[in-house]
Amino acid sequence: MPTRIAACFDRLKANNEPALIAYVTAGDPTPEATIEIVAALERGGTDIIELGVPFSDPVADGPVIMRASERALAAGTTLEKVLHIAAEIRKVSEIPIVLFSYLNPVIRYGFERLAKRAVECGVDGFLLTDLSVEEAAGFVDEAKAAGLDTIFLVAPTSTDRRLDLVAKYCSGFVYVVSRTGVTGEQSQVSAAVKPLVERLRQFTDLPLGVGFGISTAAQAGEVGAVADGVVVGSVLVRAIEATPVAALSDTMERMARELKEGAKTGRLS
Amino acid sequence: MLTVPDAGGHYGPYGGRYVPEVLMAPLEELEQAYLQAKNDAAFQAELADLLKNYVGRPTPLYFAKRLSEKFGGARIYLKREDLLHTGAHKINNALGQALLAKRMGKQRIIAETGAGQHGVATATACALLGLQCRVYMGEEDMRRQEPNVFRMRLLGAEVYSVTNGSRTLKDAISEAMRDWVTNVDETYYLLGSALGAHPYPSMVSDFHRCIGDEARRQILEAEGRLPDLAIACVGGGSNAIGLFRAFLADSEVALVGVEAGGRGKKTGDHAARFSGGAPGVLHGAYSYLLQDEDGQVALTHSISAGLDYALIGPEHAYLHDLGRATYVDCDDASALAAAVELSRTEGIIPALESSHAVAEALDRAPQSKGKIIVVNLSGRGDKDINIYRENLKEMDADTHSRMF
């Protein structure tokens, strides 16, 4: 049986439509708010949710997501609470959920225990930012045994040898980092995206989701034209930071709608 | 046991490479470049020449006669890394890596620093080799190590104030990694301790092994035998591993690493990773890490900025588990007292970091009659003058008026 993530990409592919993958830091500003934010993002057309597990030392993140991590930690968000958020979302939605985390909270929780709990809570896959495939065998085995997808990153610096290696460890989709750098909005889509996607296509048939720096509908369109999925994070997180809680649902739904429309437009041109 | 690390940089279960994918290929490239340089006689000759004529190696192994007599028992020797150019052992590694960066064609160097000694060493190496230099330093560390901030700037480096998190070494490393991730094509990250992702721990340890190699030769000359104890302070652990490496195969030499006990382990304000931490991942390596039950990295405290870090270098974790080295901790007050003792007995003002190792030696000396202790005096205390002054007012109120 295909996972929720695989089924989602299959369905979108049949419609010639790129996936909108939305990242939010779980627990920012509070665990309860995240549940509402995700519902709103889904209403706006988001296809897959990445729930960020807040971490004290997020070395791959820029200031926007760093601050979100701080807020979420201040609100008492732990990995266990993120799993609880996922379970609450799953009660009302079939949207695929990817947990996006730094490795240390996962090590502390325990791979085996986490894989079991993740399945119970309706989580579909994992992406661990600072887990290289070289160190990932134990984790991937646990995840696979539980039926969870493991998503790893490729970057413009990845050699062909590494693209092949990383793709072999991936299931669900491959996360293509659009440029060298930390997370954060950029004024334009990196010129590295297209050649990187084309290089990676030689090594895998998995769907490719491109992220890092994409913040406007037009950029979503550019990326949607060459990739299977468009990952948007910092621009949403910045809006969460700037918007009063009462207005969060409307803002998130509107932003998702614009980004999804933008992503689709790129496919048509 | 001495065939570590393996090809992936593992010391037993520790070490490895835990970084975002964007850094994996650059780390592979660095490893290749380093292995070539290591086996290149011209590179080694250039480094050896600089270490001798610019840096001032070999450093003396000084018999601390008055200290030994006062603490009646052991014969205490000090490996005088404090006499090196820039005032600490850090220059060994900074020069080695800066030469490597130049060889790799990188013109821009970034580094992190806690106490400022690695920052000063890096700024110095960059000035010497004509490289652009930016040093990341926590705002809190910039305040307490102000003299070194000025020295770095005088040497032409840009000191970037890190205002995230605890504003100390941990956050400086995180910020340096963000810079590296962003500018990886043209930038060399000159990491300052035996930690981070492979090949950094083994490379940094290689550049510091001269400390122990010299000490081993010198003690054999002076005493005709090996020491009973070799003691060094451990933040990330670079000076300690530099000393220890020469004695790893000599089972009769006990190796002791001294972590920062801070305000005392009961307070939680310390950096004693072995007694207070558990294995985890930070900044690219798996090792003992101070963390909470949810895997968030704990805040640390030490009066010495150079020991104020949540993770210990992975090779130390391995030596600890093997039982080959023993790790103890020394609190702020004992380190200060040892600094005063060494200053007044031998006329040597040590860095606060090194004072932790001195304190351990003074603790053990009375029960170690006839034994030989080698203490790595990893740096000199100029940078800590203001901290000594502030704290002496409190701890030494009686003698304060007389002494100052």
Image: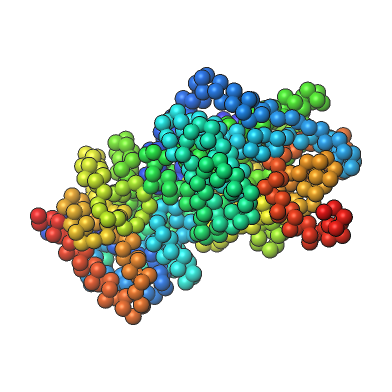
Q: Quadrant of residue A220?
A: bottom left
Of all residues shown, which one is farthest toward the front? B154
In the rendered structure, the answer to whether residue B72 lies left or right of residue A219 reads: right
Judge whether A72 appears above or below B180 on screen. Answer: below
Q: Quadrant of residue A98?
A: bottom left
In the rendered structure, the answer to whether residue A176 lies left or right of residue B378 reads: left
Q: How many callouts does the rendering have?
A: 0
Image coords of residue B49 (percent x, y) = 59, 23
Q: Residue at x 70, y 42 (%)?
A: B380
Image coords of residue B198 (percent x, y) = 49, 38
Q: Of residues B27 and A129, which is closer to you in this image?
A: B27
Image coords of residue A47 (percent x, y) = 23, 63
Is residue A147 at all visible to an observer of this figure?
no
Of all residues shown, which one is farthest toward the left? A269
Image coords of residue A86 (percent x, y) = 36, 67
Image quadrant for the N terminus of chain B? top right
Q: Of residues B44 and A155, which is closer to you in this image?
A: B44
Q: Of residues B33 and A189, which is closer to you in this image?
A: A189
Q: Residue at x 87, y 38 (%)?
A: B66
Is residue A191 at all visible to an observer of this figure?
yes
Q: Residue at x 68, y 27 (%)?
A: B58
